[in-house]
Amino acid sequence: MAYADYDADATELLETYDFLMKFIIIGEAGTGKTCLLHQFTHNSFKEHSQHTIGVEFSSRTVKLGEKRIKLQLWDTAGQERFRSVTRSYYRGAAGAILVYDITSRASFSKLSRWLEDARALGSPHLVTVLVGNKSDREEEREVEWAEASRWAAEHDVHFLEASSLSGDNVEAPFLLCARSILLAIEAGTLDPEKAGSGVSYGDRALRRVNSSSRLSFGSLSGSRRKSTTVRLKIPGTGVRCC
């Protein structure tokens, strides 16, 4: 699925929020999940990152149009010995950031198993974004963009590549996932008041999304700690995503 000229400023907010969404970050060990999340929440690369033990939690509030969304972010261990523990955190997730390493075919070949678990345990309306991490290491690439794009299309997930080292395109998967969930709420296919949806109303006590308060995504604006614009464009325009 292509999103042309999708601009977004993700803003850390201290104010109240409209929605609370649960996201899980999943994938094989060593794919850079923790570094990707740290770049998203702290706007910096995490040096000397160690393998996650079990599950680590963080959060960030972002702004999409006029809506403020607090993301609960569960970073899960990719090692097999923690699998029985981490799978319990998948329950009720509204979004999944599925990560592989573009320099590791082994991490790509095991994606189906991770996606199967997420869909079995997450929300019935789980939105998944596939992220090919370490795009800065093009010379070591083992998984071509076209191959990953086909896999994403076959499994009905969004796809893009990013670099947790440089920060390139790091915000995009989180914002794209949240945007898809908001659109599902607006369309009436996802009810935040339903148990297991992975979404709940926030402190602003928003109880209804209707035609008089439609979600606005045409030009997403705000101000970040360091002003950063994330652009998702169709293949061939500079940033690869679908």
Image (cartoon, helix red, strand yellow):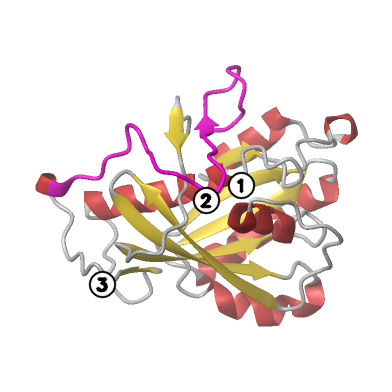
Mark 3 is on which residue type?
A: Glu
Q: Within the magenta stretch, is there residue 196?
A: no
3 or 2: mark nearer the eye: 2
In the rendered picture of this protein, how many numbered marks are placed on residues?
A: 3
Give left or right: position of 159 versus 33. Answer: left
Which residue is label 1 attached to? Answer: 130
Residue drawn at point x = 47 percent, y = 47 percent = 10
Mark 1 is on which residue type?
A: Leu
The part of the chain drawn in magenta is 213-242
Task: Please say whether residue 4 is visible from this viewpoint.
Answer: no
Which residue is label 3 attached to? Answer: 193
**Earlier-in-chain disc, 1 versus 2:** 1
Determine whether 50 is above or below 231 in the image. below
Quadrant of res 239: top right
Q: Where the C terminus falls, by quadrant? A: top right
Which residue is label 2 attached to? Answer: 174
Q: Depth check: 2 or 4 in front?
A: 4
**Earlier-in-chain disc, 3 versus 2:** 2
Per the model, the C-alpha gap separating discs 3 and 2 is 22 Å
Residue drawn at point x = 67 percent, y = 58 percent = 38
Per the model, the C-alpha gap separating discs 1 and 3 is 27 Å
